[in-house]
Image (tube, helix red, strand yellow):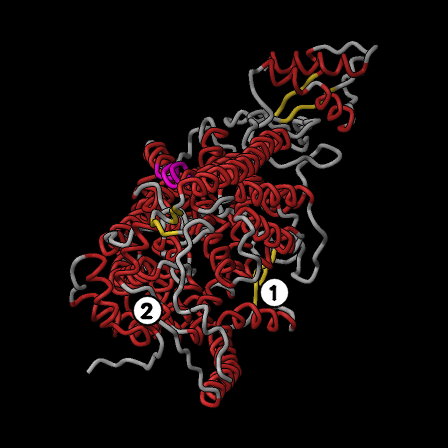
Amino acid sequence: MYLFRAVLAFAMQSYKDNVNYDVSNIVVCDETVRVSFWFVVTTPGNTSELLPKEEVENAIKKFRNRINSAFLLTDQTLDFVGISPTLAAPVHYDNPPWLIVFGVVMGLVCAGIVAMLISTFLQKARSKKASADSADEEDRSGTIAGNGIHCERIGERDGIYNRGFADDDRFTKL
Amino acid sequence: MKLKLPNPGLEERIPSHAEVEKMEEVQAGDRPQWDNKAQYMLTCVGFCVGLGNVWRFPYLCQSHGGGAFMIPFLLLLVLEGIPLLHLEFAVGQRLRKGSIGVWRSISPYLTGVGIASMLCSFVVGMYYNTIMAWVMWYFFNSFQDPLPWSQCPINDNRTGYVSECARSSAVDYFWYRETLNTSTRIEDSGGLQWWMVLCLIGAWVLLWVCCIRGIETTGKAVYVTSTLPYVVLTIFLIRGLTLKGSVDGIIFLFTPDVDELMNPSTWLDAGAQVLFSFSLAFGGLISFSSYNPVHNHCEKDAVIISIINGLTSVYSATVIYSIIGFRATEKYDDCLAGNILTLLNTFNLPDGNITENNYDEAFKNLNSTAPDIVQGLNLTTCNMKTFLSEGVEGTGLAFIVFTEAITKMPISPLWSVLFFIMLFCLGLSTMFGNIEGCVVPLQDLNILPRTWPKEVFTGLTCLISCIIALIFVQCSGNYWLALFDGFAASIPLLVIAFCEMIAVSYVYGIDRFNEDLKFMVGHKPNIFWQVTWRVLSPLILLVILVFYFVTTVSKKLTYNVWDPESPGFPTLAQQTYPDWISGIIFILAGTPCLAIPGAALFMFIYKRCCKKDRRYAEERLNTISDKVPMSVTTSN
């Protein structure tokens, strides 16, 4: 209780600047088993004059941190009825972290797409070259291999003469 | 005599057994192939196991009598799910084509079934990937401590929290305001939300890179996307079981209530869940199994995948409810502590006088001695059951309930990252199947030149879907998604599944199908398959379809909105849909269903016209050869 009164006196003194507050200026009454009580602050000069509520409230708001830490309590455990705690400023990011992760993931994905498209392109170019090569080979060997099935090629050199179209009877009787 | 509808020309349209064998040996590079059996199994498991297993099944299980729900679920799994799955696998493997190709081969009048599958895959893929975008957003936001949904933002004069957040909760606020920025009506479109557009584009681009070359790339991706969810589920199970109250959740989930079995909606929901959970009638499974070698044992595959799917549902339900039990216990403790504090403050009792254990007696005591004061306090009654049954379905489960539970665990960012990676993998592997069900029929339809590489097809599909899906990233996007979810995929799929069974059993001919299976697998399918394919499964599907249709048509068209001005806030308020929504619903649900008879009609007219031309050409030829004798004399 003494500690509380001392801290509060300090708070009032710092808030009011030039007026010196003393422990005796904090009057406590109505203590309960619940560790809750009423208190009033009197001006140093005149013990019967009470300080208005707003001034006390403002002082407490300003030095809430110090009062809390004196008792190793927090805003939730030390409750001044009617004085809502000034909430700590929320964490503010200049670059929201989600954008950073988004950028990383998208970068990887785009790199993947580019790699895929390039590899498809290269594969196509390679297979075109390969088919051109194998076409040359086929010309040289004289047989065509399609799907592993060989078939004879009818070319200029090895033509198979079709006797159905005999030379002597080119014209049909119409 | 077995019933068989007339089907002329079937022999010409399908490759014979000998041809299929030859195709196997000869045509190595023409059609894509699985690298190994594991890829195929993982892809199918990934397609079947999706978000529904995680956030629909646990809710159904708990709300329809817990452990007792297993009975209708397992029964319908065996009688409906497995036969249909086996059918799709066998048909794809035998006819070696995607969904449109397969149904067109069976009968040109059935092309509509393939088209309907394609449309369903397209629409479902569109809104499913939007959910993936939401999951990505949460994933990106998980890399910070404290998590952004663990605390409310502060109002301007720093005296309190933002009013909307203070009245609901930090997780609600983050979901409805900072993620979706929902409007209060579906008509208020509210414009595009740039952060959601970014995530949507990200989701589609990531999907494209995974399925850019069809199963060549997805086959590699599924090694991760299909296995990671199981790892994460196990981690969560172990973590969950060490938390306080988790066992209460599991007990709540599985406590059987046998009276629920009398309720027809239990059976209806079980049947619908089995069908949608197996991703049947989308065409993706037919496509996947068409890349298999022709003698692959599809019967065994179907049974294995069904068992895996069922077990995964139960496993994930256990994990989810262990975490929900933990959350409910935490909320209950908070609620009780709040009440105790209020009582202690009011009556100025010393700390520790009222604890959780003696709360009830102390409350009764105080109520009897000073009832007016106690009533004036407006203490909320803390009910464990209410907390356990809160919002545990769909997006509410993942983005509100589960995220709240995660904030209460130590090292929250880690659990958040793990959870959303798991959801993403579950959804992505399902999306592979959807894209397959869209792209392969597109190729079969020959709308675009065949010489174009597959990358173009997949790219175009992703691009168009992404653009149309911009509807879902407006302020009212959430309501549009719920609309699509409710109407676009439910009835059309039931119709398609029913048509598939009838087509194979009666148009293709069950005899021929049995012969095919004997050729592929080695033995004729046994009596169980015969009965289910020909009678039981179509009957069950018909019953479910009729009931579903009746309930959908007769229910009032309302939806739930997040309206900070509504009196019941933070509970979602009910709104009626505007009149023009009925038109949209009809287009969504009706177009795939009407595509089936529509395509049949189109084919009928087309054949009539074409037949005339062919006959005309034949007649002309006959006339010439009749009138002009041709003779060739050769001199020897």
Q: Residues within 10 Å of mark 1 (few under 14, many from 20)?
A: some
Q: Quadrant of the N terminus of chain B?
A: bottom left
Q: Which residue is mark 2?
A: B263
Q: Is residue B95 above or below residue B41?
A: below
Q: Residues within 10 Å of mark 2 (few under 14, many from 20)?
A: few
The image position of residue A21, as x and y in percent, is 75, 11
Q: Nearer the viewer, residue B264 or B278?
A: B278
Left or right of B447? Residue B106 is left
Q: Using the rendered image, report if marks 2 and 1 lie on a common chain.
A: yes
Residue at 78% in and 9% down: A20
Please give the chain letter of the residue carrying mark 2.
Answer: B
Q: Which residue is mark 1?
A: B575
The image position of residue B142, as x and y in percent, is 54, 32
The residue most toward the right is A18
Q: Quadrant of the C terminus of chain B?
A: bottom left
Q: Which residues are magenta?
A: B221-230
